[in-house]
Amino acid sequence: MEKTLVLIKPDAVRGKHIGDIVKIYEEKGLKILAMKMLQMDEKLASKHYEEHIGRPYYDDLMGFMTSGPIIAMVLEGEGAIANVRAINGKTNPAEAAEGTIRKLYAASGSRNAVHASDSPENAAREISIFFNASEIFD
């Protein structure tokens, strides 16, 4: 079974959508292997978003992701990476399909409620940033 990392971002945490978002993933057949609430600091955020360093939106992204608590989760399921990305919807909520998390809960393309890994390699890298092996219950 495939694993992926999901982050519920500060905007969705502030909006009190944690339970709604978790319920969607579970109802779609994904299993939660790990979950925690934390506040990203600059060091953690820059490690997670290292591929974005130097891009025009990087400073805004860092400010946003360190602005409040997040929920980090490891989800597992058949085709978890593609399934989670479909459940999340397009980055811009205006373009996201009805019923997707971003259509329901995101304010904009940069305040888009959730993050999900985009490949098995990134899932493994991102999971290791937020969780150690003893925190993952599979």
Image: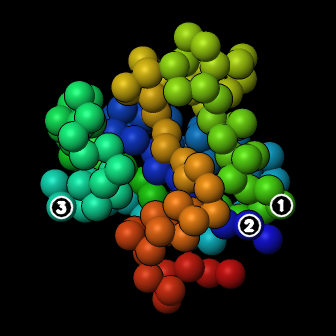
Q: Amino acid at mark 2?
A: Glu
Q: In the image, is 131 to the left or to the right of 104? A: left
Q: Which residue is mark 1?
A: 78
**Image height check: is 9 above or below 120?**
above
Q: Earlier in the sequence, mark 3 or mark 1?
A: 3
Percent position of residue 9, x then y: 40, 41
- What element does badge 1 sit on? loop
- Give the Cα separation between the discs numbered 3 and 2: 28 Å
Q: Which residue is mark 2?
A: 2
Q: Are marks 3 and 2 in contact (CB under 8 Å)?
A: no
Q: In the image, is 85 to the left or to the right of 55? A: right
Residue lying at the far front of the rendered structure? 54
**Image height check: is 57 above or below 24?**
above
Quadrant of residue 75 in the image? bottom right
Give the residue at x 18% y 61%: 43
Q: Are marks 1 and 2 in contact (CB under 8 Å)?
A: yes
What quarter of the picture does the N terminus occupy? bottom right
Percent position of residue 133, x then y: 50, 86
- What element does badge 3 sit on? helix
Q: Which residue is mark 3?
A: 43
Q: Residues within 10 Å of mark 3 (few under 14, many from 20)?
A: few
Q: Amino acid at mark 3?
A: Lys
Q: Are marks 3 and 1 in contact (CB under 8 Å)?
A: no
- Give the Cα separation between the discs numbered 3 and 1: 32 Å
**Image height check: is 26 above or below 44?**
above
Q: Earlier in the sequence, mark 3 or mark 2?
A: 2
Percent position of residue 130, x then y: 40, 68
Q: Nearer the viewer, residue 30 or 54?
A: 54
Q: Earlier in the sequence, mark 1 or mark 2?
A: 2
